[in-house]
Amino acid sequence: MYIKSTICGVFNIHKSYSFRNVKIFRKTIRQLPMIYKRRYSSANEDREVAETPLENIRNFSIIAHVDHGKSTLADRLLEITGAIKQNAGAQFLDKLQVEKERGITVKAQTASLRYNYKGKKYLLNLIDTPGHVDFSNEVARSLAACQGVILLVDANHGVQAQTVANFFLAFGRDLKIIPVLNKVDLKNANPERVASQLKTLFDIEESEILKISAKFGTGVDKVLEAIVERLPSPPVNRTGPLKALIFDSWFDKFKGAISLVYINEGSISVGDVIASVYTEKSYEVKNLFILTPFEQNVKTLFAGQVGCVTCNMKSSKEAMVGDTLYLKSTPVQPLEGFQPARPMVYAGVYPMDQSQHGALRSAIEKLVLNDYAVSTAVDSSPALGLGWRIGFLGILHMEVFIQRLEQEYGTQPIVTAPNVTYKAKVIGDKNIAKYGGEEMSFNNPIHMPDPSIVSDYYEPTVLGTIITPDEYLGPVTTLAMEKRGLHKSGSNIDSHRVMLQFAFPLNEIVVDFHDTLKSITSGYASFDYEDLGYQASNIVRLNILLNGTLVEELSTVVHCTKATLVGKRMCTKLLDILPRQQFLIAIQAAVGNKILARENLKPYRKDVTAKLYGGDVTRRKKLLAFQADGKRKLRMVANIPIPRETFINVLKR
């Protein structure tokens, strides 16, 4: 019994464990060195992380256009440094089902890698970032915790629009940039041509460019060496008071809100009482861990390191991205954060049936906890019932959000056509008081103020960058003009490709512009945009009338020059979708009192003269007149039943 107690005490084995016979006891004795080695190794790794000198830490991100190989390169870096086993799975850091299905990165992921180089042990904090324009805010947040980036470019396709945007995003933060050409193993790859593009656009010398194949791991070891040699260590102070920047957060049902932080100054330990600059609430640190990419608990995080903090925050709204954490006993000035995400696109989300409202509400609430860029507001519709008006960063962001609702929570939401946020300048003292100010915003056509009380309307605009082969220059320019684009600049990247910039109204490009651009250029063009503020515009509210009755759910905001075209298209679409009735249905598109388009949905007609066999023709005319009179009365008093499927088919695009 004494031996048992000693073993249990040294190796922390539960004392209630019963050695039923000598065989089990002997087996336990044989396993003791292995248990000791494993626990000693884990403790040793914790100490290595904690004691990593500041000059041996590197914080970096991988930035690139969509499908240029960011996640594949991240896999090779994890494998070479021993963080994961060989062939552990493609796109290891892409955790979500939607990421694996679409082959894109939606959520930035972090991994702390240990790397031995020239006899020294380095800690490399990798932050993988998305590549699609809708998630550029994720990229900006990731760069806030970095001192350098790997600019990854496909050696086959060359520089794309998002490559340009990401470069200037990193360049504007004075980050050190390591240019890397990927997919040099492809037979159509042309590294010399792409290197020339980098020189023309970014003034990057060819001698600085690394050439790799992330798929096969060729040259990836050179990337690790460049990270150590070219990137600076974090410029931080470990002896000062704690300053920790929250650059990401998510919700765990067991741990609550988890904050991913970059320690800018000082250190944080388990048991410390910390406070938030934004919420002014205080918390006790319950747990600290780094992602390797698996969770590894540590007792202290020092300045220059990246790790996760749990401290009994009840929701991710308390873990505000861009907030500064500090020791409660030592107040500090907040760190310079970054602009919060601003939704660009709004859409109505409704349950398929009102009996499913509770399940959909619960699913949206849980998903919003892990996606702080989404904004929600309760909304209602006479036809679709109670739902929500949800703001997204873009169309892809909306599609991913809805797909996650369906896959992860088993819901079946109805999504209306997306709209952007407009502004109106209200005139008249009474109207200003009614609308709460001279300038008001609205993203739902129903809330658009009457033109009689508005002096100016404003619509959001963006600066769009298009990179395309020169053979498609004509069709691309035509498309841009159709979308009310205003040409800003144009330049040649090389002998075969051009870069164009247009100022676009956001409403024109938010739905189908990207798909159309890919279609007319056989997939070779790329597109990226950035916010350009609001511009005065002559917008109108286009209403749909059925037999003179306004259907608010089908209203939309369009530019006055496109009102007739959009109205005709919607009337034609409704003509095919609406079910026929016993009476004529007039489908009209109108702006104010002016009818712009009309279609007539013909009624069913029963052959009331079928029972007549010969006889006087006046009898036949009398029956037909009686039928026409009845249909006229029915049309005057009848309500037009509109099935829910009609709204689904009309509103979705």
Image: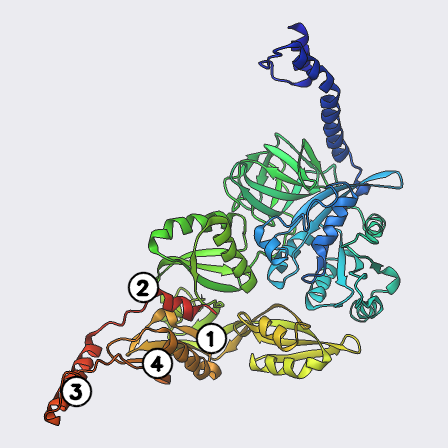
Question: Residue 388, position in %: x, y?
Answer: 41, 57
Q: Is residue 424 left or right of residue 494?
A: left
What amino acid is labelled 3 in the image?
Leu
Which mark identifies residue 588?
A: 4
In the picture, measured across the screen, residue 99 lies left or right of residue 594, that is right
Q: Which residue is mark 2?
A: 382
Amino acid type of disc 1?
Tyr
Q: Nearer the viewer, residue 28 or 442?
A: 28
Regarding residue 394, the answer to whether it shows in the image is no
Q: Are marks 3 and 2 in contact (CB under 8 Å)?
A: no
Crowd around label 4: few <14 · some 14–19 · many ≥20 (10 Å): many
Query: Considering only vertical position in the picture, is 508 above or below 243?
Result: below
Q: Residue furthest top?
A: 2
Lower sequence index among marks 3 and 1: 1
Q: Nearer the viewer, mark 3 or mark 1?
A: 3
The residue tagged 1 is 457
The x, y position of residue 225, in whole percent, is 85, 49
Task: Give me the residue at 50% from left, 52% from top.
Answer: 407
As measured in the structure, the alpha-carbon distance from the residue carrying label 4 to the one carrying label 1 is 25 Å
Q: Looking at the image, is 105 positioned above or below residue 334?
A: below
